[in-house]
Amino acid sequence: MRYKIKIEPLGVEISCGEEQTILDACLRNGVWVPHACTHGTCGTCKSKVLKGEVDFGLASNFALMDFEREEGYALLCTAKPKSDIVIEADVEVEEGIEFYPVKDFVGKVIDIDDCARDTRKLFIEIVNDKIFYLAGQYIQLYIPGTDQNRAYSIASRPLGEGNSIIELQIKKVPGGLGSKYIFDELKQGDRVKFAGPFGRFVLRKNFDNPMLFLAGGTGLAPIKAMILDAIESGVKQEMYLFHGVRSTRDLYDQDVFSRIEQENSNFHYIPALSEKLPEDEWNGELGFVHEVLERKFQKFSGFKAYISGPPPMVDACIKVLMRGRLFAEDIYVEKFFNEKDRITGGSKVGVVSRI
Ligand SMILES: Cc1cc2nc3c(=O)[nH]c(=O)nc-3n(C[C@H](O)[C@H](O)[C@H](O)COP(=O)(O)OP(=O)(O)OC[C@H]3O[C@@H](n4cnc5c(N)ncnc54)[C@H](O)[C@@H]3O)c2cc1C
Ligand code: FES
């Protein structure tokens, strides 16, 4: 069964399957409604249903309150139509950015690299197509035997002709569904299914402001794609990458960023450890990313900042940036929400995730 979805104030009408989320139908039809986590946690896709009935799906009670449901709001990333519907959505058009429609892909795992403690790089060769995306976007990887998927950012640089191989960087989360699949079951040569590209955490190349890239753990993945893209595009402004991990066992891709730093005088690589173990040989920065950032800079006005990683790390960085006079419109974030955040509300869901 399929239903008609009319998106106001655009007046555009699309078709949506009864088992499909409204967001998914919009993105596959090139209607770029705001979204971030695509898992009912951040509240970014909250929209008013003007007419018709929806199944709210697995929307977090923190991202969509009871009174909002009663007032006719829904999270488009979890809501499925139960009739023809009309929604009011704040469709985004941003100068200099053109998003690609979401598609389905089949891939083969061509390499698995255990690059740091409980951290894997997956290299996936797409067998049915090529993927077009913007640096910073992510895919939804389907978990076989379930109706679930997990969001993983693409770490590879987007190629003009589309990519047939993508790199993912994944941190194991104890008790996690996706982690069990990726760390205990998936082998080289296995087939995987995914959809993408999703998200609006993308490199804005139309500004010439100096850039801050703040990554926590595998929050490095989308930022790696952005930095590779910026360097390839000949971006001349100063760029600073702060990569925070716990100890040296968690650090990876140092060779990549050290080489970029050697070859580009405008790029500065600042890895930081939050705890130095007795066996760590380390003369670099110590502390959490936001602490190291605050030691390096006191004022941030004039910068564009990109922050990616666990929600508390992202929130702590936003606070430091705002204290240093950087406004919300100059801060782009990707919070790596998980199931626990959806159930428990995570950290300040819906407050800063709209940045
Ligand atoms: C936009 C986006 C991009 C992302 N990109 C990346 C990336 O590039 N790399 C990366 O490593 N991660 C990324 N993530 C995070 C990733 O999508 C997963 O959320 C993360 O890997 C955990 O998934 P999982 O399936 O292993 O764990 P989940 O199944 O999500 O479980 C997470 C934790 O919650 C607990 N839990 C599960 N269900 C419940 C419940 N009902 N009640 C209480 N606790 C529960 C589990 O025990 C576990 O400890 C991204 C997230 C988002 C939103
Ligand atoms: S995109 Fe829908 S709640 Fe995050």
Image: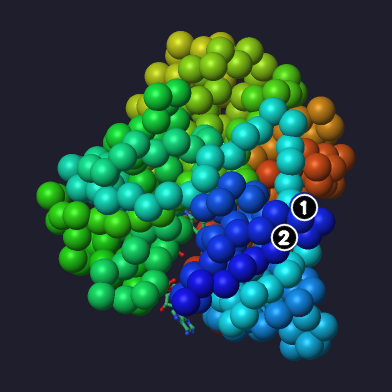
Q: Is residue 104 visible?
A: yes
Q: How is the image coloured?
A: rainbow
- Residue 158 shown left or right of residue 75 in the figure: left
114, 44: nearer the viewer:
44
* Residue assigned mark 2: 7
Is residue 273 at least partly visible in the picture? no
Q: Between residue 277 and residue 29, name the one nearer to us.
A: 29
Contact (CB < 8 A) between labels 1 and 2?
yes
Dot 2, how many residues are within 10 Å of its Cα: few (below 14), some (14-19), or many (20+)? Answer: many
Q: Nearer the viewer, residue 83 or 178?
A: 83
Horizontal and vertical percent position of residue 191? 19, 54
Dot 1 falls on a residue whose secondary structure is loop
The three-letter amino acid code for the residue at tag 1 is Leu
What residue appears at the point 65 percent right and 66 percent down from the top-left corner?
5
Mark 2 element type: strand
**Marks 1 and 2, Cα distance to the nearest angstrom?**
6 Å
Q: Position of residue 140 (x, y in %)?
A: 42, 57
Residue behind mark 1: 10
Q: Could you tell me which residue is drawn at 40 percent across and 24 percent down?
A: 161
Instruction: Count residues near mark 1 (Cα–Cα under 10 Å), then give few for <14, some for 14-19, many for 20+.
Output: few
Q: Write down the quadrant of residue 97 in the picture.
A: top right
Residue drawn at (74%, 84%), measured in percent from left and top?
69
